[in-house]
Each structure stands twice: as C-alpha cells, then as structure tokens.
Image (spheres, helix red, strand yellow):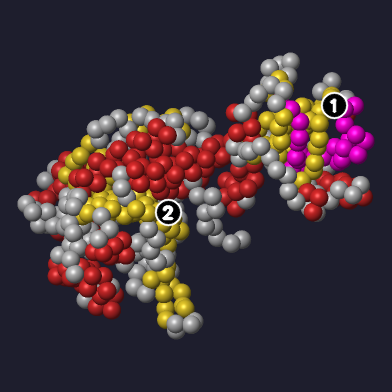
Amino acid sequence: MTLVVTLFFFMENTTPLHELIAFRRQKLQSLRAQGLDPFGDNAAAFATSGSIEKIVDAFSEGAPIKAAGRITAYRDMGKSRFLDISDISGRIQVYFNTKELDEATNAMAAQLDIGDFLGVEGAYFTTKSGEKSIRASKLVILSKSLRPLPDKWHGVQDAEICYRQRYLDLIANHASRTIFKQRIVIVREIRRFLEERGFLEVETPMMQAIPGGAAAEPFKTHHNALGMDLFLRIAPELYLKRLLVAGFPRVFELNRNFRNEGVSRRHNPEFTMLEAYWAFANFETMSELVEEMICSLAQHIGVGPLIEHRDDAGNVTRTINLERPWRRAAYRDLVEAAVPGWFQLDLEAKRKKCTELKLDISHCEAEFEVTQHVFEKLVEEKLIDPCFVTHVPKELVPLAKLNGKDPSSVDVYELIINGQEISPGYSELNDPDLQRERLEHQAGGEKQCLDEDFLGALEYGMPPAGGIGIGIDRLVMMLTGAASIRDVILFPHLKVK
C-alpha cells in the first residue's frame, strides 16, 4: 500500500510544531554523524542540467540527467520510492530503488523530509503510468528543511502569511507562482517591445535634492557627507526630459518610485513604474504605442483579449475586453454624460449637486478638484474596458501642453482599465516660460520647491515630445486578475508587528 508523506505548516494531527522541528533536527544530527552536512562544503555545489522546466522540456528516454530541487512529495512503496522535486518553474518525479543504491545513500534517504533540497543524478525514463520521470542512480542532500512546509493541498490560506512570508506562499500556492512568473515575462517583454522600437533604457537618480515630476509626498533622508537633505524620487520625469534636451530621441526607464502616502488595495509606498519619452511625438502617438504594447503583453502571458477577474470563490466578477481599437473619449464629455448640465453649474451649485449625489467633497477646495472627484466616482470606477480619457483639466497635469482649441485643458490621455488609471500620456510641455509659470502655480509660490536646473535645461531647448507612464503593479493586477496590489509585489510593505 502506498504511503503518502505530506507535512503541514500547522499539522492537523496531535503532534506539536516544536516536536516536529525537534525531530527534523535529530535527522540533521544523524546526517552529520554519517559525514553528510546539508549546510556544509559537501553540499555547496551541484551542477544541474537546468531548471526543472527545462529538464522536463528536454526529456529524452534513457538520456543522462542531473537535477536539483525541493522535495515536495514522497511516496514509499517498500524498496521502490517516488518523490517530486520542484522549483519555481515546475516539478518532476524521481524514482529510485533501494536495492540499486549503496548503503550510505539509503541511510541518507531515510533522513529525508518534505522541504529538503535534493540533488539527483540518473537517466530519463517513463513510468508505467506514462509520467516523465528520472530514474536516480545517485542522490545528494543539498539542504535540510528544519520546519515543516505548508500543506500542499490547501496552500497558505492566511493572506497575512502570504504577504509577510512570501517564500511560503510561493512554495505552496500555484496561483501565486503563476502571477509572479507572468510579472517577470511582462517586465521582460516591455523592455523587448521598446528596444525593438529604438528606445534606449537609462537610469536616473533615485535620491533627489528636489522631488519633482508628480504631486506627491516624498520620503526624506539626509546625506551626512554632503550635509544635505535628499528625497526618494516620486517620479523620474524631470531627469528623463533632461535627456531629451541632450539629444536622446527615445528613452525609457523601468524605475522604483516612492510616495509617502496611503496604503490600500491599489497603493504601495514603493512601486514600479515605466516612463518613456519619444521626441517629435505627441500624446496620440503615445496612446497608440501603449495600446499596442499592452495587447502584446497580454498575448505573451497567454491571456486576452478577454480577461476574467474572479472572487475568492472562483466566480467571475467582471470581464475586461482588450479587443482593439480601444475607446477614446474626452474628459468633459464623460463627466457631462454622468451628470448632465454639470459644466453649466457654478461652484456652489456643483457642491450642492454632489450632496444630492451623496459624494463627499469635503476635501475638495478648487472647482477642478470637485469635478475630478465626480469623474473618479461616477466615471472612472465604471470604466472596465480600456478607455483613453483625453483632454483633462490643465490644473491636473502641469507638465503637459495646453490644448490649442481649449486652453483650459491639456493634450493628455489617462488610460482607464478595470476602474483605475493604468497609464497617463502627455504631449510634453517644452515652453520654459510657461512651464515655470505652471510649476510656480502648483507650488503655491514657494520658489524653493522649483527644480531650477530642469527649468534651465528647457531654456536650451527641448524638442516636442510625447511621454507615458505605466504603473507596472497595476498593469500586472489587470492582466492577471489579481485583487490587490499586494498580490503582485513579492514583498509588499506591511506594518511591523
């Protein structure tokens, strides 16, 4: 009869966790007594034929193979033993017969546990049930697991553990492994996509004397040697535009940004952004680039054009349709459709209307802020399929060009998918005098907040250009169906217990 060996994160039998750990430590001492230290030099290196995925893909009956991975299943059938070894890329079954191995190896195998890392040398073979496997002729213990792993059948159910101990989540939860493997592909394909179109990847400072490029609260630090305060960047925009001045025609940066603001399902204080700038382009050019890019990314990770988002029970809650072409609609038209006659109202009437609509605008002072709150609650949250919202109020984007026909708006798009902004894109403002005026207005007249070097760079001349930003974390959420930004960040920020 097959004995299935499966250890649990919190065992469902009566054995206390501390006893399980003590038992594993006894096995560690037994191994060391045999001259096998799983943490010593004898287990320091084991040259493999590649990742588990590559080993499975290269299967050739009878061919020699070397593999290594974590033991995730163990089946004892007397003299015949089957175990699974796994890594982030996949799993493969290993078979060995105690009669075919020497006494020392069998003694070592008796000390194995689920979670140990094992090196296997042998040959490919197919079992009677048709499973591609490795017939082992040599086993080497490479590391010992001193704590039992999560139950592989139920994974890690507690979201708090998933986020704080991501390593356990990735070991036990297939869905999490899939999301993060997809994220890796997404980032890689963004680079490939842009490089194929002539964009050059650059790096700009993460610590800045003057935080700029967005309206957000920065993190502050101090540099002792220079005797000056510095800020973690909230955006790389002003440095990337300096490179347009320098003559770079197309640049991009996949960067880490930091904003000392709230934490929520859609916000993490440290996040990943793509910013790209294209000389002699405009916001319409950039919208076409982003549309093509996101559809290409969806194809590369095997989703789309219909992307299903599900609840915890697996029920489909909404479906996003990425079929091209994507909708384009003016900001003003969308607000007017949501609240007919809105733009004919004065500020006081708008506030009264918001009260009727049960919208809390207590935090809104200026008229454009009231309108923006109406947009966010009555328009943005209801845009599920991709929509480029164009020509937003100029107060919202001080770094974009004014629209020639309506100077109260700017030549900008905001790409909304699944009820949240995925990407803004601008026709970049390159008039140094107007840029200074608008930044001074944003800063409330506090000139010490202005990046004078950036404004000086503009005076040397910056070509007309289009620019984009894409929140990579939100993009991954949308493409993979993840419910929270914490589900797509390997180590999200959490309050220390």
Q: Residue at x 46, y 48 (%)?
A: 485
Q: Position of residue 135 (x, y in %)?
A: 77, 27
Say which residue label 2 marks: 272
Q: Residue at x 65, y 45 (%)?
A: 168
Q: Residue at x 37, y 54 (%)?
A: 201
Please rate how many residues cluster around mark 2, counting C-alpha atoms within 10 Å: few if below 14, some from 14 to 19, many from 20: some
Q: Quadrant of residue 301?
A: top left
What segment is highlighted magenta in the picture? Answer: 99-124
Could you tell me how far apart the alpha carbons at marks 1 and 2 are, in whole angstroms? 49 Å
Q: Quadrant of residue 57?
A: top right
Query: As rendered, which of 469 and 496 lies closer to the eye?
Result: 469
Say which residue label 1 marks: 97
Amino acid identity at mark 2 = Thr
Give the answer, above or below, for where 288 lies relative to 258.
Answer: above
Q: Secondary structure at mark 1?
A: strand
Q: Residue at x 23, y 70 (%)?
A: 457
Query: As rendered, which of 449 and 34 lies closer to the eye?
Result: 34
Q: Is residue 436 left or right of residue 406?
A: right
Q: Is residue 89 left or right of residue 429?
A: right
**Residue 96 within the magenta-colored segment of the rendering:** no
Query: As rendered, which of 288 and 381 lies closer to the eye?
Result: 288
Amino acid identity at mark 1 = Asn
Report the quarter where the C terminus lies.
bottom right
Residue at the outermost top position: 128
Q: Position of residue 13 (x, y in %)?
A: 80, 37
